[in-house]
Amino acid sequence: MISAIVATTTVALFVHGYFLQPEFATALQQPSLRLTCLAMVFISSLLFLVQRNGWFTKQRMLNLSLLYQVFVSFSIGIIETSVSAVGNPPIRGLTFLGLWFFMSAFLLPNAPLKMAIMGASSIAAWGFGYWININVNGVLPLQDNRLALLLGQMLVTGTWMLLINRAAVTMHLKQERAEQLGSYQLEAKIGSGGMGEVWQAKHKLLVRDAAIKLIRPDVLRASTGREAQSLLRRFEREARVTAQLQSPNTVALYDFGHTRDGSIYYVMELLKGLDLQTLVERFGPMHPGRVTNTLIQVCESLEEAHRAGLVHRDVKPKNIFLAKLGLQYDFAKVLDFGLVRVPRHSEDTSITMQGVTAGTPAYISPEAAIGHEDIDGRADLYSLGCVAYFLLTGKTVFDEPSVVAHAIAHVQSPVIPPSERIELPIPADLEKIVLRLLEKKKEDRFQTAFDLARSLRDLETVPEFCPYTAAEWWATNLPETMTPSVLDHSPLPLASSQPAMRVG
């Protein structure tokens, strides 16, 4: 932010001085002054771009900021002393370097020793800029008493900068300690939603990356007492349910806990890849063989949950993640069990929350849409059919303008076959499976995720999307997730977690 302030302020002051101060307009004829102006705008804009895009780590940005502070001080020295002080006029107000010191202390706090070195270097850089003006640009030197007054101002404001910087660093450390959850250190926010926030984190001893989902105290304080209690119970239930499941296609849970400031969190594996919603939006409909492979893996996760009496109730592309896991590509992970329905004997069956819909309108089953209490795993399979439809066509089953219209369509409207919604070929056997999943009556669908996976494995007309093809796709489209050895050489076929599909 401070680099953007410097860039815009430099332009504004130069334009202002050029039109309102003839002496400054004359001084601008000097190449060194114009070059300094352009360099300050360019470097400030570049630093803003680097910070905005997160290209460097926080520590590297802090080190860069020290060099930037010295460079700005040098530029201030050239600009501030570019006009000769004819007649030895009195100095009124502070040098711009003093203002820069105060801004740096508040907006760019750093380690005290580094800040002290930066302050001394900045004063020296200001003096170097002043020396250039005298010896290169022919500017008349300041009287000794005036120069001594400016240097005194720099020393005083530099001292205040160190004191303010120390207070700012202390506040920053307190905030950082508040962001240490158990053995994990928060690093960057990944996303946020109704349940709270998701952060990228790292275990402080094992140096293992993880994702942390948390509810902060301010989120709870913003809710009514009943809503806050429901939110907490739902969050804790999601953690417990996820921890019970051991399928490799269900996101793994590492830890759960509370912090001293009242935050509640759980730690799960950090995945490299894309959710299916983002993948289709970015790259278009998926290859039928790839869709088949993904559905089989999702069935592995759902079958375990259904056998435990759990119903996900929010199966949708956003909650299915396609990841690179070790040496395996296109590894599907099912996320977000926050709306899961548990067995009737559990005390958690009554947990609801005002304003929370049991599912997403575009992917909700007919029985859930009309509020049936007897929801079982076949509702998840209907939602999975909606997901398959979206993966093959890039479109939802029904394109309705409202939640109510979506619910009515799922209950009453016939499904247009996916092959009629897109020009790309869709194997007839795969389309038949998708349409069976989208039957209105749950008795007419596949009865278990195991049966669905078996039918998908038996397909003979679906073109193969083998591990070798998956590796090539990842190397081409998501190279940031690949290891250097994979990028530098042709990707090798990797062992798949699923049985090989037969190709006709």
Image: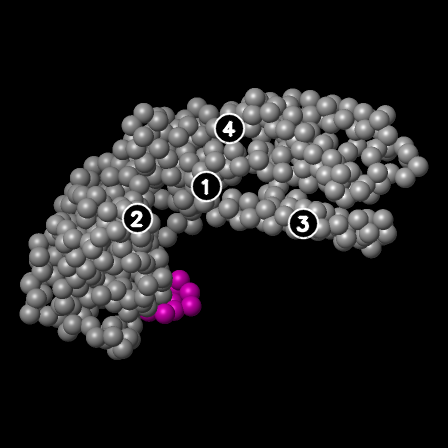
Query: In 3D space, how far apart are the residues under numbered discs 4 and 2 (Cα atoms)?
Result: 31 Å
Question: What amino acid does circle 4 point to?
Answer: Gln
Q: Nearer the viewer, mark 4 or mark 1?
A: 1
Identify the magenta region: 398-405
Viewer can see residue 294: no
As drawn, the label of residue 310 is none
Residue 402 inside the magenta-drawn segment: yes
Q: Is residue 249 left or right of residue 502?
A: right
The residue wearing badge 2 is 481
Question: What amino acid does circle 3 point to?
Answer: Leu
Comes first in the chain, label 4 or label 1: 1
Query: In 3D space, how far apart are the residues under numbered discs 4 and 1 (Cα atoms)?
Result: 21 Å
The residue wearing badge 1 is 56
Question: What amino acid does circle 1 point to?
Answer: Phe
Regarding mark 2 in the picture, which secondary structure is present there? helix
**Mark 2–mark 1 contact, CB under 8 Å?**
no
Name the image quarter holding residue 468: bottom left
Q: Is residue 42 above or below residue 421?
A: above
Regarding mark 4 in the picture, which secondary structure is present there? helix
The residue wearing badge 4 is 175
Nearest the viewer among 293 and 19 is 19
Viewer can see residue 460: yes
Residue at x 17% of width, y 39% of height: 246
Q: Is residue 204 above or below residue 303?
A: above
Which quadrant: the N terminus? top right
Q: Nearer the viewer, mark 4 or mark 2?
A: 2
